Image (tube, rainbow, N blue to C red):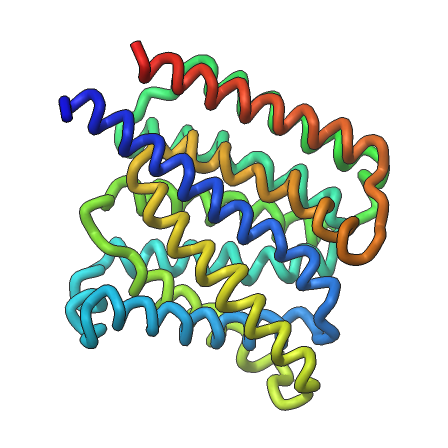
Amino acid sequence: MSSTAASAAERSRGVVLVAAAALCWSTGGLLARLVDTDPWTTVFWRSIFTAAFLLVVIFIQERGSAWPQIRGMGWPGVAMALCFAIASTCFINAVARTTVANTLVIQSTSPFIAALLGWAWMGERVQRRSWIAMAAALAGATVMASHSWGAGSITGDLLALITAIAFAGATVIVRRHRHLRMTAAAGLASVFSAIFAWRPARPLDVAPDDLALLALFGAAQLGLGLVMFMAGARLIPVAEASLIGVLESVLGPVWVWLALGETPAPAALLGGAIILTALVVHTALDLRGAAR
């Protein structure tokens, strides 16, 4: 296989992995609606189950010993862990303090932030079509939120902005240090999140049914999503990884509709169609360019 073909295959694998991660993460809104715990207790137990899941993954990757990967992550791993922990913790608390609509629009700025960080830190050039696709995705998210915009609080909106910045930072770090395995760093992120939530949480006041949902929330929704995202984000530009991650915002309302019967507003359907169109066109142009 030529180097060009190998690079194209690697990029395609990265796109698929990041899209699969977005698919996992898109169930977060539904699970947050189903679980009957306060935000800090949700963050605590979600983080505990994520850390346990990732520890198993590390043992499988390292054939029974987690220490080599923990030792090898270094300061980049710690920095990435802090970014993911901040993003995860702020997201849960943002949804609790402002509308999902506000959170959705503000988080959609993450691709722009990631693109700027990638350009400033690594010199990654962002193609014009990527800027256009990111702008279209932001416009689509704004349309999705238009039916309920303005009903939230400034505290929740600020937490959503911190989520976007922290997620963008984590994406850039994963790409910048793509030679490192970051599974241990993701596990450390969960430990940080649990520490953040420990004092305000009420971990013993959780019903068995909610604990089962929180286990699913931590292991499958967040843990598996992190594993796939970190594997994929190493292979594609940071702007593209963050852009594909916006797919989470499109699919989130779909799962709530299918599971709880909440019909999305027309604005949500239109905005989602705009985002999906932007992603499909951007991916098609990438594939056509790679085939030349």
The answer to whether residue 98 is above or below residue 265 is below
Query: Which residue appears at 33% of the width and 33% of the height?
Result: 236
Say whether residue 214 is left or right of residue 66: right
Q: Going by the picture, which residue comes out furthest to the top?
A: 292
Q: Going by the picture, which residue comes out furthest to the bottom?
A: 204
Say whether residue 281 is left or right of residue 59: right
Query: Which residue appears at 54% of the width and 71% of the height?
Result: 46
Say whether residue 67 is left or right of residue 112: left
In the rendered image, residue 117, in percent from the top left (x then y), is placed at 38, 34
Quadrant the N terminus occupies: top left
In the rendered image, residue 240, in percent from the top left (x then y), is placed at 43, 30
Q: Quadrant of residue 148?
A: top right
The answer to whether residue 135 is above or below residue 157 is above
Quadrant the C terminus occupies: top left
In the rendered image, residue 91, in percent from the top left (x then y), is placed at 60, 56
Q: How many marks?
A: 0
Q: Quadrant of residue 12?
A: top left
Query: Which residue appears at 29% of the width and 65% of the height?
Result: 184
The answer to whether residue 21 is above or below residue 124 is below
In the rendered image, residue 125, in percent from the top left (x then y), is placed at 33, 20
Query: Which residue appears at 34% of the width and 73% of the height?
Result: 56
Q: Which of the pair 8/155 is nearer the observer? A: 8
Q: Which of the pair 179/279 is nearer the observer? A: 279
